Every structure is written in C-alpha cells, then in structure tokens.
Amino acid sequence: MTHELDTRLAAAVESRREALVALTQDLIRIPTLNPPGRNYREICDYLDGRLSAAGFMVDLIRAEGAPADSDRFPRWNIIARRAGRGGGDTVHFNSHHDVVEVGNGWTVDPFGGEVRDGRVYGRGACDMKGGLAASIIAAEAFISTCPDFGGAVEISATADEESGGFGGVAYLAEQGWFDPVRVQHVIIPEPLDKDRICLGHRGVWWAEIETRGRIAHGSMPFLGDCAVRHMGAVLAEMEESLFPLLASKRTEMPVVPDGAKQSTLNINAIHGGEPVQEEGYTGLPAPCVPDRCRITIDRRFLIEEDITEVKAEVTAMLEKVKAQRPDFEYEVRDLFEVQPTMTPEGAPIVRTVAHAIQKVLDRAPDYVVSPGTYDQKHIDRIGKLKNCIAYGPGILNLAHQPDEWVGIQDMVDSAKVMALTLSELLPSGD
Ligand SMILES: [Zn+2]
C-alpha cells in the first residue's frame, strides 16, 4: 500500500469529523435500553436509511424465538453489505446496538448526545455507539477513496450483547452469517482504546449453589436446620481455601486490568430465608428457620484452565464442608458457561490492524485480553470464525458508568485505523 493512499484515506476520515459526531449523537438519542430491549427496530431502521443511501444491501433480521424476543420487544438486527469487485475477502464490523440501564449520578441527559470538551456524552457513547459510528464513517471514507476495492465490507448492529447476545450475534451465527466461507475478518469495535487490540476473553462459569435445611419455628431453631448457617460455612471455606487457590493461578494471557490476570470468583447474589416483602408492607417478619439458601457464583477462568477442573474445585470445597457438618446438603446448578478464546497475534486481522495503528498513531499496539466476554464468543464457538478481534474507540472503564462519554479525537483516530485496515485487506485492482 502506498503512503499516498494512506494520506488520502486519513483525509477522507478527517473530512467526516462532523458527520461522525452527528452520527454518534443520533445513535445515542435512540434509547435502546436492555433489558427489556427498547427501540431495536427504530435503531435498525435508522441505520438502514443511512447505509442504504451509502450503497449497502441491507438485511433486517429478527431473532424470532430467541430468549427475550417478543412481539412487544422484538430482537431486531441489521446486517449491511457493500460488495466491490468480486473475488476478495469480506471484512465485517460488528457492533451491538443495545445499552444498559441509565442508573444514578448523571449530570447530563443520558440520551441527549451532548458534545462538550471534545467528547460526546450519553448512555452507550463508549459502549458502543461511538465504535459503531466510527466503523460506518471508516467504511464510507474507504469506499469513496477506493471505489474499485475488491471483496466486500459488512457492518452489523446487533441486539442483546449486554444480556448474552442470544437475540443478536448468537442467533445470526446459527443462521450462518458468520460462516468463514462468507466472512473472513471480523472487528468488534468495543471500547478497548484506539491503540489496543483485544484478542479475546477469559472463560465464564455461572452457577447456583443451594444449601438445604429444615424449616421450624424461629424460637426453637434446634428443631430445624438452618440453611443460612450452612451457607455461612460454605462462604467461610471459600475464604479459607478457594479464594487463595484462585489467586495462585496466573495466566499468560495479556488480560487487563492486572487484577484479572488470575482466576476470579464473584458472588453475584445471596438469598435465604423469608423472601423480601413487597414495598409498602409494614408488618414484621415471621420467625422461621430458613430451609434453603442460595448463592450465584460468577467464576472467570483462564485459557490454561479446564472447565471440568474449575467445577471440580467447587465440588471439592463443598464436599469438605459436608465432611464437617453432618446434616449438610447442597446442590450445584449450572447456569451458563463460555470457553476462553484468544486469537493468535499472527492472525491476518491482528497483523493488519497492528500495521494500521502503527501508521496512524506512530506506535505499536498493546495486545490485551478482556476480563469479561463479549460477542466474540459466539463468532468463535458457533460461527467457527477465529480471525476476530475487538478494536474500537473509548475507555473500557467508562462503560456502564454515569456520564459515559467517548472522545471525538479517539473516534476519528480509530476510524482512520479501520479505513487503512480495509484498504489493506480489500485492495483495489489495477
Ligand atoms: Zn459493549
């Protein structure tokens, strides 16, 4: 690729700076809250208008029958394709269009798209409507600069990433949209920073652990068997043996932040005894010995670990508690699991984006692995497409926070990286 072409591509992105900001604002102003999944059709229609005008062929796909899909809250997705000359590769940019709840602590309108001090503010600004906008501007700049490119560019905006991606990328992958015969390179513009390439993520195991007891009158607890006390023993054993064991396991994966370079476990919830009363109930609790107590655990594991071993550690810990408590009974229920994934640094998409970062930012990229999962899991596992990374503007720590923002210069720079990547993977004919 010539230096002169790089300069023209960068200028084509630069000239679209205002359009990039306006597009990001428009996307933020469509409140695609998940749950429950609001305005999915509206954002897909908006993108349809935008991308059809730019010469893309558009498919709107509802994930019918997927979890959470309903006539009230249908799970709409959009895939847009702009083909050049035949015979080349397809480069696909996949963004999720859903955003998480607003929460407290905002000083700006979360759906206003306010621009201040070189930033665009709003729920979803960095996670990840800024990345979606950057990929669209990059594609438009590339197509206008290199009209006779080979292959095809695809842009998708998909549902439900924030709740597992089953009504979005998982559904599309099952339908063959991410078949490596169709698509050869995938970039997911999640907010990982403009100079970092995210190769993959750690694994996940969610499970529910329940301890069992026997209900009795609270004034005579000796006649019952308290499930909460049993759970207390489980938690004590976790502190004693499981957490130190997890802390001792370190990965070679370049996970950021550093605290996530080890195995981790969170207790997402604990419930036991009398259920929480409805709001407005002014009575007192009824005295009972709790006969069950439940926790939900969120175990994140490393590429060096095996999921059967991860589960066996928890069972071993529970068995240890059981040996010390004669009446102790427990059950473990699997809720969800994802294998860790990491695209090799030598993969074509990694090398090409690294090269483009070097040219645009004049530095080598950092390679990172995400502590949590994102839609790459479905592209990898269902789609069987390994040549996939996350690369996009924005600071990961701002995701899901109040006063979320994305930097305009970061969006422009990452759009330049994406445009240069397209020109390298989809060269024009002579
Ligand atoms: Zn995201």
Image: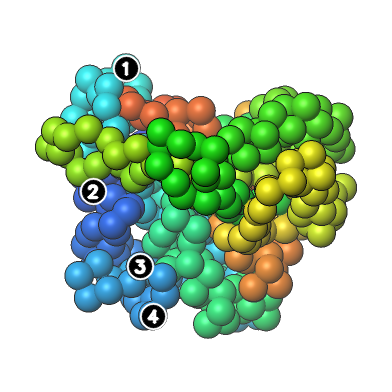
Q: Pointer 3: what residue?
A: 68
Q: Secondary structure at mark 4?
A: loop
Inter-mark Cα distance, 1 to 4: 44 Å
Cβ–Cβ under 8 Å for marks 1 and 4: no
Q: Quadrant of residue 120?
A: top left
Q: Pointer 2: what residue?
A: 31
Q: Residues within 10 Å of mark 4 (few under 14, many from 20)?
A: few
Q: Secondary structure at mark 3?
A: loop
The amino acid type found where label 3 is placed reads Ala
Cβ–Cβ under 8 Å for marks 2 and 1: no
Q: How many marks can you see? A: 4
The amino acid type found where label 4 is placed reads Gly
Inter-mark Cα distance, 2 to 1: 23 Å
Vertical comparison of 346 with 198: above or below = below
The amino acid type found where label 1 is placed reads Asp
Q: Pointer 1: what residue?
A: 117
Label ID, residue 65: 4
Inter-mark Cα distance, 1 to 3: 38 Å
Q: Observer-nearest residue: 331 or 326? A: 326
Decide which of tag 1 and tag 3 comes sooner along the chain.
Answer: 3
